[in-house]
Image (cartoon, rainbow, N blue to C red):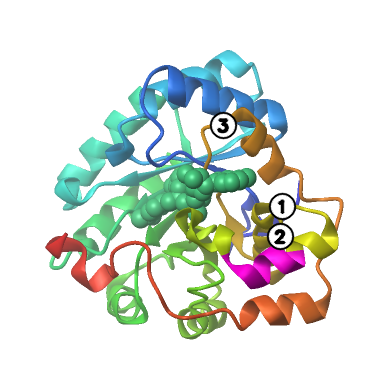
Amino acid sequence: MQEILLNNGVKMPQLGFGVFKVQDGKEAYDAVTWALKAGYRAIDTAKVYGNEESVGRAIKDSGIAREELFITTKVWNDDQGYEETLAAFAESLKKLQLDYLDLYLIHWPVKGKYKETWRALEKIYQDKQARAIGVSNFHIHHLEDLLQDAVIVPAVDQIELHPTLSQVPLRTWLARHDIAVECWGPLGQGSDLKNPELLKIAEKYQKSVAQVIIRWHLQHGFLVIPKSSHEVRIAENFNVFDFELDKVDIEAIDKLNTDDRQGTNPDDYDKR
Ligand code: NAD
């Protein structure tokens, strides 16, 4: 498994499995079980996905040693603030049946709250309850503001990023500050899978469009967490280590950016 070295020296598997919109119960339990069987070792969940209990059960039942796994969850907007975040963290750990997390993230930059929330994440990190802490959906201006008071620089910014939303200015800023880029919606939540240019490239390599897009993320050095609840697709999305995209194809995919979001702009998270 390829790994990315985070800014605190912790190694994170570059390709992980996301479980947004995977229903708590059998669906989430099966999906995580299939993912671990396929070889994924990083799982990305969030309190708001409502499936931490099933994810935790699947992890436990897998019998895989805890230190081989990399588990991420996130503090939801309603739980932001110092004490609230500490309480939410404890609840997530309990649901996941874990005694530490690998990565804990602020899910969205809630105005007037994210700095207090970050202080709680720093406490969690200093108490060794999370091996790394980071943010999600933070623009440059949120990060600049956070860094004015932060003691610890976030290890990761998990952002919407895919071929039609390639986020070059934010990526460049993050690279300069040694904050790893983690891509949510890496397949454009399914929308980039129909792109004609990507279909042509997939045909050239005799791979699926999903596999080509995941290679594009990997070859750019991003952390990437595609989601599926189908066993065959879960395995397909992990089966990407036997080919490489040529430079010319990487560049052709780079040109597909249209700055179109599938999700919410982080400045409008409260207007959804
Ligand atoms: P994604 O880009 O991973 O797309 C998932 C969809 O693509 C699936 O529902 C399915 O329709 C399709 N798909 C996946 N594999 C396929 C395949 N091999 N063939 C055909 N179709 C396929 O979108 P996502 O789930 O939104 O993002 C991935 C993960 O990122 C989430 O599960 C979650 O963990 C995380 N996420 C985080 C945030 C955040 O705010 N931090 C927001 C959204 C998602």
**Magenta region, residue range:** 195-201
Q: Which residue is mark 3?
A: 230
Residues marked 1 and 3 touching at CB (< 8 Å)? no
Q: Is residue 146 left or right of residue 272?
A: right
Q: Position of residue 244 (x, y in %)?
A: 83, 63
Above or below, 73 against 146 in this view is above
Above or below, 31 against 171 in this view is above
Q: Residue at x 30, y 82 (%)?
A: 141
Residues marked 2 and 3 touching at CB (< 8 Å)? no
Above or below, 65 against 11 in this view is above
Main SS, magenta region, reads helix
Q: Which kind of residue does numbered mark 1 sit on? A: Ser
Q: CA distance from mark 1 to mark 3?
A: 15 Å
Q: Residue at x 83, y 64 (%)?
A: 204
Residue 28 part of the magenta-drawn span:
no
Mark 3 neighbour class, 10 Å CA radius: few under 14, some 14 to 19, many 20 or more: some
Mark 1 neighbour class, 10 Å CA radius: few under 14, some 14 to 19, many 20 or more: some
Residues marked 1 and 2 touching at CB (< 8 Å)? yes
Q: Residue at x 40, y 74 (%)?
A: 260
Q: Position of residue 202 (x, y in %)?
A: 75, 61
At mark 1, the secondary structure is loop
At mark 2, the secondary structure is helix
The label number, if any, that marks residue 208 in the structure image: 1
Q: For disc 1, does the CB lie below 8 Å from ligand 1?
A: yes
Q: Position of residue 128 (x, y in %)?
A: 45, 42
Q: Which residue is mark 2?
A: 212
The reply to whether residue 8 is visible in this rendering is: no
The label number, if any, that marks residue 197 in the structure image: none
